[in-house]
Amino acid sequence: MKKQAVILAAGKGTRMGDLTTNIPKPLIEINGKPFISYIIDNLVKAGYERIAFIVGYKKEQIISYLEREYSELEKIIIPQDNPQGTGQAVGLVQQYFYGNFLVIGGDHIISPNDITGLNFEDNFNYVSALNHPEPQHFGVLKVKGEVLVGIEEKPAHPSSNLINISLYKFTPEIFAALKRINLSPRGEYEITDAITLLASQKKVRVRPLQDYFIDLGKKEDLPVVEKQVRQYF
């Protein structure tokens, strides 16, 4: 079976300010290449042959770029025209995917080593984690050994320094979990709510990153991101 992955690339990227007025966030150039190209290239290096793209804001530009620069790649383009969160986005791939699959955020570059570090073949779901000095600003992972117990969103007193960085490996069980969750207080279907359901059944493991993590969060991050990309590419 081909290794398959999803890149979540539908968001507007409002924290990028005027940089996303005319282009979608995944196409912001970093050292002469669109940010999304680094994500795709690392997935391909890690052996992923079939990639779905969840697109929304200015999707025509992303589609045109993919068709031009990645004509040989097996692509599935899935519009998320009325976005209601990451849970909704992942649910959209059910009709296209069979078996296990990877999910990665469109604003994160993860190394091929860490992508392959997630066990694609077994029957567990995986959440990738990053050791962070200020975990209280993020989704904090409560773990027992390698098993995920739960996720605390921006807790005042974090139970660990491990934060969720939106690199997941899922089994098809995620789709049933997604059907059971409700809209969050901010009006979105949160993928973390579905993960929490699976964690209650001891079906989720946590794997800390071993290599680099490049996060294009806001406009002010650009100099750091460009420096990191020069270092690793």
Image (spheres, grey):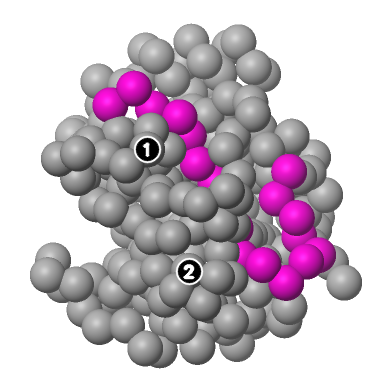
Magenta region includes residue 32: no
For badge 1, the amino acid type reads: Ser
Q: Which of 136 and 108 is in front in this view?
A: 136
Image quadrant assignment for residue 89: bottom left
**Dot 1 lies on which element?**
loop
> Disc 2 versus disc 1: distance between alpha carbons?
17 Å
Residue plotted at (76% across, 45% down): 116
Residue bearing mark 1? 160
129, above or below 195, in the image: above
Position of residue 103 measured from the top left corner of the image (x, y, whole percent): 56, 59
Q: Which of 44 and 200 is in front in this view?
A: 200
User: Mark 2 or 1 closer to N-term?
Assistant: 1
> Does residue 77 show up?
no
Image: magenta residue range: 117-134
169, above or below 46, in the image: below
Q: How crowded is mark 2: few (under 14 residues within 10 Å), some or many (20 or more)?
A: some
Image quadrant assignment for residue 217: top left
Q: Residues within 10 Å of mark 1 (few under 14, many from 20)?
A: some
